[in-house]
Image: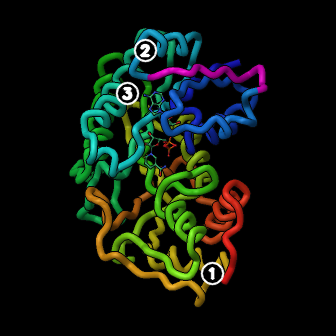
Amino acid sequence: MERVLITGVAGFIGSQLAERIHSKGLEVIGIDNFSTGNAENLSNLVDSRHFTLFRGDILKLKGLSKAFKDVGTVFHMAAQSSVPKSTEDPVQDFEINVRGTLNVLECARKTDVKKVIFASSSTVYGEASVLPTSEEHPFLPISNYGAGKAAAEAYCSSYSSLYGLKIASLRYYNIFGPRSRKGVMFDLLQKLQKDNKKLEVLGTGREAKDYLHIDDAVDATLLVAERGKLSGEAYNIGSGKSYSVKELVDKLLKILGLAGKTNPFYTGFSWLGDVQKTLADISKLKKLGFKPMVGIDKGMKTFVDWYRSKYGEIAAG
Ligand SMILES: NC(=O)c1ccc[n+]([C@@H]2O[C@H](COP(=O)([O-])OP(=O)(O)OC[C@H]3O[C@@H](n4cnc5c(N)ncnc54)[C@H](O)[C@@H]3O)[C@@H](O)[C@H]2O)c1
């Protein structure tokens, strides 16, 4: 049975990727330091004899290298995953996202690992000059988080060229769905739970982003690992559709039965480093056979249902 290692296995994407790979009958090894990861995300896996969890930090090379024993493929998902935190503490962001990635690549080249799939981000493009944005667009990050992901991608490229490792960087856009405990949708639900008469929304409402449901993101991740060109290539992982924050707010209020009852108001500014408009050109991913299956409305419903099951009801009216 092939062994697959997932760093950041207790996180939003890592845990759902782990479940999918495990369901294919593969042996899954996970490592996480639980800084933002959640033990509950692993509840479907912990009792399986085909799942092994290392509680550890990717910054500690010795412990990390133990997790690489007999591993064939690595999905490197562990990261400091917040743009605002990368503004507050650029050094810590660099340590985890750049040095941490270098550690993973070092372990990979010193063992029998055949493939490394790296979780990069669309933030490497910054405020893209062309929409939809293809993988050819230059790196012009406007956040430290984006800069760190770009630097880590550069190492993926050099390690692929120098040591013959098969590597791809996945530039995830806004991935949403059950277990996502950050981002605009989670933030809005938390606020509505406290007070559903009014809703403060950061920004102008005109920011427009590419959202992809977690089920599709996992599909895309596995597709690249199985069929992608792995010579340090990058792939946009998005839906190819963009929605404004105002549209999201309207959809959310409708799902909750709060349309016309809650008064949304916009602060006019978002957080530093926030890209205002994103839209992925996903032609390269489509050539591998990718087709997003979960639309925004159905996807948001799955998210709201999950939120209610974890955090309780948001009373209508
Ligand atoms: N969710 C998105 O929309 C999105 C978009 C672009 C890129 N990404 C990238 O995809 C990956 C997964 O994102 P996510 O949304 O699941 O984030 P997440 O924060 O839920 O998961 C990251 C996981 O990494 C773990 N981790 C952090 N530092 C670690 C360390 N030093 N050692 C070991 N484990 C550590 C955390 O505990 C967490 O479980 C990240 O690399 C992120 O930057 C995510």
Q: Residue furthest bottom?
A: 260
Task: Look at the image and tell me in which quarter the C terminus lies.
Answer: bottom right
Q: Is mark 3 within 8 Å of ligand 1?
A: no
Q: CA distance from mark 1 to mark 3?
A: 41 Å
Which element carries disc 2, helix, strand or loop? helix
> Which residue: 51% across, 74% down?
248
Q: Is residue 95 above or below residue 281?
A: above
User: What whole-number distance in Å separates the C-alpha atoms at marks 2 and 3?
Assistant: 10 Å
Earlier residue among tags 2 and 1: 2
Q: Is residue 303 magenta?
A: no
**Would you name the residue on which mark 1 appears?**
254
Does residue 239 appear to the left or right of 128 in the view shown?
right
Q: Position of residue 12 (x, y in %)?
A: 57, 44
Which residue is nearer to you in this view: 60 or 286?
60
Instruction: Name the residue tied to disc 3.
Output: 101
Mark 2 residue type: Cys
Identify residue type, mark 1: Lys
- Magenta segment: 47-57
Q: Which residue is mark 2?
A: 107
Indicate the amino acid at tag 3.
Thr
* Residue lying at 50% horizontally and 17% vertically, measured from the top left: 113
Q: Residues within 10 Å of mark 2 (few under 14, many from 20)?
A: many
In the rendering, at what x and y percent does residue 229 appear? 45, 36
